[in-house]
């Protein structure tokens, strides 16, 4: 087996490293010192740099102006973005593009994908449901009225909804089938209530009151929502991995310089054991992430459906990133809580990623259901 990344995937990483090298994780006010959101909008300047570097178009087919790369390439770029806490809807845009490319009509693909590739059309995704603890598709009712669909319901914690042009959101029909609707933010019947994430970023509770969407704006294939959810979950694992890698590097640097009793604290056995355990967490997060991304990219068969590998990856991502930031805070001592030092920002983002699309316990339950449905020999 060859576990190395392709030349195109490595090129994407190099381009991402070049773009993110100039990004400061403390470029906005600290969430610990800000009563509301740290900013009203995402980082538009960085978004333009990502577009100019062709990183927004990576998963989009060449006929629509993209590179035609797979979810693995998207996850590689997401990992780099998390190392600097990049404030851009890269995950939502990439996952939406891949989903639209597979399930949207030819006309809608031609209309939207080239604009997503250039960064001129910003698409976010609603995946939190009504409360964040229930299947997201059950939060919105969808019924047909002539050639159109009518949507009623609520989606919570939608990232950067106030700044996006379109919101891709799940709903369910009267007979229980999931559908996806691509709703313009300014469409009649759409209202947004401000929310703030643990990381201090601006979210929205999206209310839909008899919102009308056309048939081409609605993806009725039942597999579309499952595919989008899988992409979002796997991408969240990539963000957790990148964040964890940067935090462990910060911790290694600090403990290597901080001296106690005349010796660097990194030389103390208790410190070395804790950092070694966190390194093991990172390696497990990495292995399970790429297994999940590979299943999505190749459609390869396995003992369980791809959802099983994705559940394992999210369990490790949620538990691993939490342990990494907690250990980092402990080993930094009081310095880790200093708002002039970026570690507390990584801790806040880690908590958000841990709970996004379900904590470890939710995915353990899902994995148990899959194991019951697909007994292993």
Image (cartoon, grey):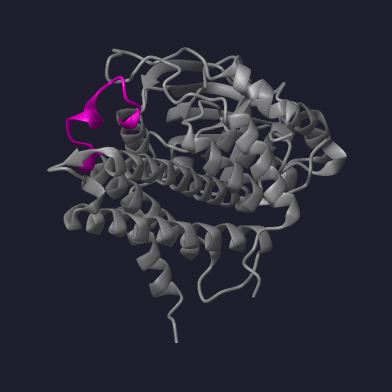
Camera-side residue of 144 and 163: 163
In the rendered image, residue 315, in percent from the top left (x then y), is placed at 37, 56
- Please, is residue 30 above or below residue 85 in the view? above
Quarter where residue 264 is shown: top left
Q: Visible in this render: residue 131?
A: no
What residue is shown at x 39% (from left), y 64% (from top)?
367
Q: Is residue 113 left or right of residue 240?
A: right
Quarter where residue 66 is shown: top right
Number of labels in the image equals 0
Camera-side residue of 306 and 31: 31
- Please, is residue 124 above or below residue 283 in the view? above
Q: Is residue 208 left or right of residue 157?
A: right
In the rendered image, residue 259, in percent from the top left (x then y), is placed at 20, 40
Locate the C terminus and report the quarter of the image it occupies: bottom left
Would you say residue 337 sits in the magenta stretch? Answer: yes
In the rendered image, residue 57, in percent from the top left (x then y), is placed at 73, 36
Would you say residue 62 sits in the magenta stretch? Answer: no
Q: Magenta segment range?
A: 329-343
Q: Is residue 356 left or right of residue 53?
A: left
Q: Visible in this render: residue 361?
A: yes
The extreme left residue here reads: 261
């Amino acid at each position: 087996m060859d576990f190395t990344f392709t030349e195109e995937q490595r090129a994407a990483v190099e381009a991402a490293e070049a773009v993110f090298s100039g990004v400061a994780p403390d470029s906005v006010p600290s969430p610990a010192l800000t009563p509301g959101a740290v900013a009203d909008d995402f980082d538009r300047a960085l978004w333009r740099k990502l577009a100019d570097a062709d990183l927004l178009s990576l998963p989009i087919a060449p006929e629509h102006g993209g590179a035609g790369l797979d979810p693995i390439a998207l996850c590689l770029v997401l990992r780099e973005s998390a190392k600097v806490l990049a404030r851009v809807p890269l995950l939502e845009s990439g996952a939406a593009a891949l989903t639209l490319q597979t399930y949207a009509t030819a006309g809608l693909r031609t209309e939207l994908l080239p604009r997503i590739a250039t960064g001129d059309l910003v698409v976010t995704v609603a995946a939190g449901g009504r409360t964040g603890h229930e299947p997201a598709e059950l939060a919105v009712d969808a019924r047909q009225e002539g050639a159109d669909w009518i949507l009623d319901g609520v989606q919570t914690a939608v990232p950067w909804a106030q700044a996006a042009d379109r919101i891709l959101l799940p709903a369910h029909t009267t007979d229980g089938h999931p559908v996806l609707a691509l709703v313009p933010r300014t469409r009649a019947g759409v209202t947004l209530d401000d929310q703030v994430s643990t990381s201090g970023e601006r979210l929205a509770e999206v209310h839909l009151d008899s919102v009308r969407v056309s048939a081409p704006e609605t993806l009725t294939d039942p597999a579309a929502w499952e595919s989008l959810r899988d992409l979002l979950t796997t991408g969240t694992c990539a963000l957790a991995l990148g964040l964890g890698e940067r935090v462990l590097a910060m911790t290694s640097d600090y403990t290597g310089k901080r001296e106690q009793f005349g010796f660097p604290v990194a030389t103390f056995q208790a410190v070395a054991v804790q950092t070694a355990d966190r390194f093991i967490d990172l390696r497990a997060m990495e292995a399970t992430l790429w297994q999940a991304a590979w299943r999505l990219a190749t459609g390869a068969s396995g003992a369980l459906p791809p959802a099983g590998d994705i559940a394992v990856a999210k369990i490790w991502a949620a538990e691993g990133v939490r342990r990494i930031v907690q250990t980092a805070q402990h080993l930094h001592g009081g310095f880790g809580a200093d708002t002039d030092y970026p570690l507390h920002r990584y801790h806040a983002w880690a908590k958000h990623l841990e709970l996004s699309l379900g904590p470890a316990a939710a995915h353990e339950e899902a994995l148990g259901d899959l194991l019951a449905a697909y007994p292993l020999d």
